[in-house]
Amino acid sequence: MLKHGEVNPLNVSGLRKLEHRPPHFEQVIFDIKTTQKQIADWIYENLEGRFWLGDVYSDKGDNSRSVSINKCAAFERHSEASYFSLMLDTVNRSEW
C-alpha cells in the first residue's frame, strides 16, 4: 500500500488500473458525488490489487426504456470490493 511506503509492482509496471473491465472483477456501482480522480487516488493509497474505474449503463427494469449512467469500480480481489463499498461514504463526499 502506498500509504505504508511499500512499492506495488503493478503500479511500477502500469498494470494496476485497467482500461477495460474483465468479467471476473467484482463490481461496486454508485452515484458519484466527488471527482473520479479522488476515488482513484483513494484506491491507489488504500488497496493493492488491480481495478477498473468507469461508467456503466443500467436500465430501470420496468420497461420504461429509461437508462441511467452510474460510476463503477471493479476489483480483481473481491475482499477489496467489500472494503471499498464499506468506505465509499467517506470517500464519495461532495465538497459543497
Image (cartoon, rainbow, N blue to C red):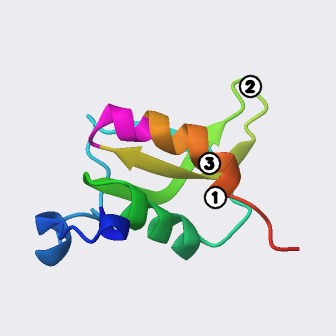
Examine the rendering and report whether any part of residue 62 can be seen: yes
Give the spatial CA distance, label 3 vs label 2: 30 Å
The residue that mark 2 highlights is: 63
Rendered position, 11 above or below 1 = below
Examine the rendering and report whether any part of residue 27 can be seen: no
Kind of residue at badge 2: Asn
Pointer 3 or 2: first along the chain: 2
**Mark 1 burial class by Cα count in 10 Å: few <14, some 14-19, many 20+:** some
The residue mark sitting in front, 1 or 2, is: 1
Q: Position of residue 56 (x, y in %)?
A: 53, 50
The residue mark sitting in front, 3 or 2, is: 3
The residue that mark 3 highlights is: 88
Kind of residue at badge 3: Leu
Give the spatial CA distance, label 1 vs label 2: 34 Å
Kind of residue at badge 1: Val
Most extreme residue toward the front, as rendered? 4
Q: Which residues are magenta?
A: 76-81
Residue in the picture at 43% in, 39% down: 81
Q: Position of residue 52 (x, y in %)?
A: 36, 56
Report if residue 80 lies within the magenta region: yes
Report if residue 57 lies within the magenta region: no
Q: Position of residue 64 (x, y in %)?
A: 79, 32
The residue that mark 1 highlights is: 91
Rendered position, 10 above or below 37 = above
